[in-house]
Image (cartoon, rainbow, N blue to C red):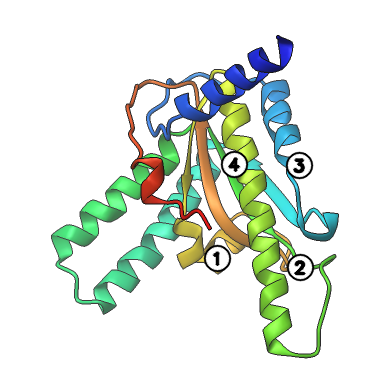
Amino acid sequence: MPEMQLESGLMQLLTLRRSLRRYRQEPIPHDVIERVLTAAIWAPSAHNRQPWRFAVTDSDARKVELAQAMGARLRRDLTADHVPQAVIEADAARSYERITAAPVLIAVCLTMADMDTYPDARRSQAEHVMAVQSVAMAGQNLLLAAHDAGLGACWMCAPLFCPDVVRDTLNLPQDWEPQGLITMGYPAQEREKTRRPLEASVLWR
């Protein structure tokens, strides 16, 4: 039945996708990037407000600028935590390589511009979480679409620790809140992954 074939294809897409960090140094055609982003904006969202925003760069100079700025913040934070210098430099070098070696970077952001507003902190916080959830679902669509297009991709959470650095370096609007940085390119590695048994994560009530 066609429905079963569709389900099988979807399940294969979901289970075969990997977070890949090493890429071949070849450009991604603009139309392929747009196709991946189109998949992202078709995610569900709270109130259908679509609070996601994306900043795309394939500029080597901009990648270096961003990696250096994020690295400087990382060094400052870890130094304040009294982390050994060798560990700090290893972390910074790893982050720098991941950012600068990716053919394309996509900063995944949210904006509260079209979300509901409330006079109290409790509901305001809930509304912000709803926007975060919406953007995360768009990010998942993006990652799946990248895999479907033969691309490798990986979500970096580092912008959560330095949103102002990412916003300023990429010259983003002030209401854009960086949530993640997706590195993307044609894969130069393969990875296997496992999951805990389903029963380890599910309660039937």
Q: Which mark is residue 112?
A: 2
Residue depth check, mark 3 versus mark 1: number of the one nearer the observer = 3
Q: Residues within 10 Å of mark 4 (few under 14, many from 20)?
A: some
Q: Residue at x 69, y 55 (%)?
A: 134
Closer to the camera in the image, 33 or 201: 201
Residue depth check, mark 2 versus mark 1: number of the one nearer the observer = 2
**Residue type pointed to by label 4:** Gln
x, y percent for residue 130: 69, 64
Sequence-first disc among 4 and 1:
4
> Residue beneath label 3, please?
41
Q: Is residue 28 visible?
A: no
x, y percent for residue 4: 65, 16
x, y percent for residue 62: 55, 45
Distance in Å between CA atoms under marks 3 and 1: 22 Å
**Residue type pointed to by label 3:** Ile
Q: Is residue 19 above or below residue 202?
A: above
Q: Is residue 101 visible?
A: yes
x, y percent for residue 63: 50, 43
**Residue type pointed to by label 2:** Met
> Residue beneath label 1, please?
163
Q: Which mark is residue 140?
A: 4
